[in-house]
Image (cartoon, rainbow, N blue to C red):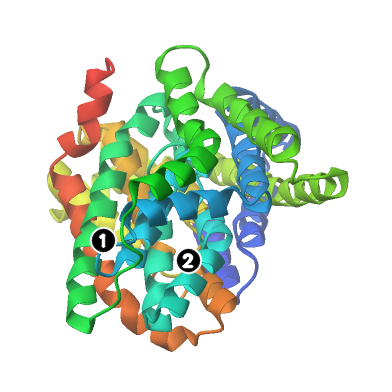
Amino acid sequence: MLITIWIVAFIIMFIFGYPILFSISVPSMIYILLSGVSPAVIMDQMVIGFEKKFVLLAVPLFILAAKIMNESLITERLFDFANRMMGSRKGGLGHVNVLVSIIFSGMTGSAIADASGLGLIEIKAMNDAGYDPEFSCAVTSASATIGPIIPPSIPMVIYSMISGASLGYLFIGGVIPGLFLGISMMVYIAYISHKRNYPSGEPFHLKSLGRSFYKAFFPLLTPVILLWGIYGGVFTPTEAAAVTVLYALILSVFGYRILGFRKLVHIFKDAALSTGYVSAMVAGALLFSYIVSREQLPALLTNFVMNSGIITNKYTFLLFVNVLLLLLGCVMDPIVGELIVMPILVPIAIFFEVDLVHLGVVSVLNSMIGLSTPPYGENLFIVSALSKVPLGGIIREMWPFLGVLIFVLLTCTYIPDIILFLPKMAGYMP
């Protein structure tokens, strides 16, 4: 009876459009009050939950690093370097858009930071060169999904917290899928650029490339330092987030002398607000997870799945996960989706012997597709606001990119070694 009240209350609050934090927390509090569980027990559970989630410290640090990067004009140096490298090709600025997202993804771990930080530069450059504005926006939204797949990755930090999977192996497992996704987008961009006769950029000059590389050299070192530090055993992924912040501050304040005291105060305030939102969501998710565990929902769902005959092995389970997360991604924030469904799905994945690193990268890829999928599509709203291009036109251009994203998702889902190849080379034992 209590679990029914809890589920109905959650559904009602969600339907009526309450903020997702309240939609998670209020039904959970109703359940706790009606169940007679002591609030002290709940507080103990939450304190223990946070104490064990040391990895969560990486989230505010990566958020802060992303905001510093965006405010310090580092993105412009990266864009110029990518443009000198690939802009001379047919539809070159579309390829540059994807390439600079791949580079930026190794610094921030956030698709929103990519879309909002690089978006205006990318869209303006493409529009000025004669690309259709709707296509420019669609490329920008789609390429931003690469951000949290290539390490570092804020959604992977959240998944690691929930599942207990190694964050280091999750990070390295995202490298090949992220590059595969970027290459696949470039193939489509090359096709559509020839079809629509989009322009080529300036001719390639080694000297110009060298100058732009010199200007972008120190920002380009960020992912190198991160990966070398993590996989060389110098620091943990959480410590890597702190190193990223320190390095970004040194570049921006002392190296390029772009950020002053007032800008830094604004950046820290903004990062604190974002961190507060994520922390509140995690606190609500811990309540949610406590009830899921107390009611033995994973076991009940596993028995139902097995008896229904719909899901009989790990392959049908992975298909179920993909469909579920893609649908959730259409209506809610990716981190929220992870916090709600992963406590239920992870035990079932273990039952079907699905590797948790594989599942983690697949789930993050799913979540990122949701950012560019209507009606929620946060990336779509960001690029529309930046460019003043109507959302309907962007969505029309977005559908082929969604086809590319789903192709990569299914390939990575059913060929696990695309994800697990590098972790295995690094010593991972599935």
Q: Is residue 391 above or below residue 126?
A: below
Q: Nearer the viewer, residue 294 or 387?
A: 387
Q: Is residue 345 above or below residue 116?
A: above
Q: At x 67% / y 45%, what residue is drawn?
A: 68
Which percent across, then down, holds residue 127?
A: 45, 78
Q: Is residue 294 placed above or below 9 in the rendered structure?
A: above
- Gap between marks 1 and 2 measured at Cα: 16 Å
Residue 103 vs residue 10, the one in the foreground: 103
Q: Which residue is mark 2?
A: 122
Give the number of marks. Answer: 2
Please give the label number shown on residue 185. 1
Residue 65 visible in this rendered orientation of the protein: yes
Residue 294 visible in the shown view: no
Whole-percent x and y of residue 364?
A: 38, 48
Q: As rendered, which of 267 and 319 lies closer to the eye? A: 267
Which residue appears at 31% of the width and 46% of the height?
178
